[in-house]
Amino acid sequence: MFKIMLCCSAGMSTSLLVSKMVDVAKERGLPVKIDAYGVSEFDTQFPQYQVVLLGPQVKYMLQTLSDKAATKGIPVQPIDMMDYGMQRGDKVLDDLDPPSPNSFCILS
């Protein structure tokens, strides 16, 4: 199972996007677990995940959070502002590293 953490300012604004991403992942047969947290929970939560996606409202923290996550080998990626605003769960999954569905299976 590939574990994805979404991080925003309070964890609330990403909940709808998480739901859309989960729906797309199910349609594609991708074994994923996706959760949303506020940035205040980053330090305690990120080690449980294989990638962290940042909402646009906390993108300014990308370098700081990337440095923390790098200690565990976990990449941190910003979510495209348009995809976030339009709640395009499919595009957010498409833009992930690893980029292909087969990569999800390899990492599970």
Image (cartoon, helix red, strand yellow):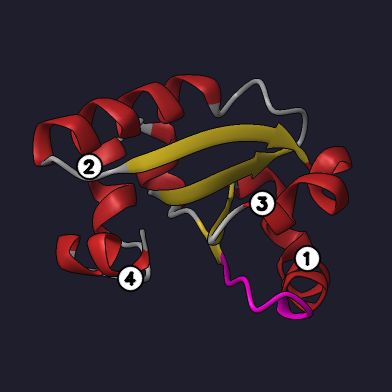
Instruction: Look at the numbered disc 3 and give the secondary structure of its residue.
Output: helix
- Say which label, 1 or 4, has the lower sequence index: 1
Name the residue carrying label 4: 98
Disc nearest the viewer among 3 and 1:
3
Instruction: Look at the numbered disc 4 and give the secondary structure of its residue.
Output: loop
Q: Amino acid at mark 4?
A: Pro
Instruction: Look at the numbered disc 1 and give the secondary structure of its residue.
Output: helix
Q: Are marks 4 and 2 in contact (CB under 8 Å)?
A: no
Disc nearest the viewer among 1 and 4:
4
Instruction: Tell me, yes or no, whether the highlighted magenta stretch contains residue 29.
Output: no
Magenta portion: prevailing SS class: loop
- Number of other residues with Cα within 10 Å of mark 3, as a class: few under 14, some 14 to 19, many 20 or more: few
Cα separation, mark 1 vs mark 2, equals 24 Å
Residue at horizontal 66%, vertical 20%?
Answer: 12
Name the residue carrying label 3: 48
- Say which label, 4 or 2, has the lower sequence index: 2
Residue at horizontal 37%, vertical 70%?
Answer: 97
**Rendering quarter of residue 62:** bottom right
* Picture disc at residue 65: 1
Cα separation, mark 2 vs mark 3, equals 23 Å
18 up-or-down from 93: above or below: above
Disc nearest the viewer among 4 and 2:
4
- Number of other residues with Cα within 10 Å of mark 1, as a class: few under 14, some 14 to 19, many 20 or more: many
Residue 60: x %, y % from top left: 75, 61
Residue 46: x %, y % from top left: 72, 53
Q: Are marks 1 and 4 in contact (CB under 8 Å)?
A: no
Disc nearest the viewer among 4 and 3:
3
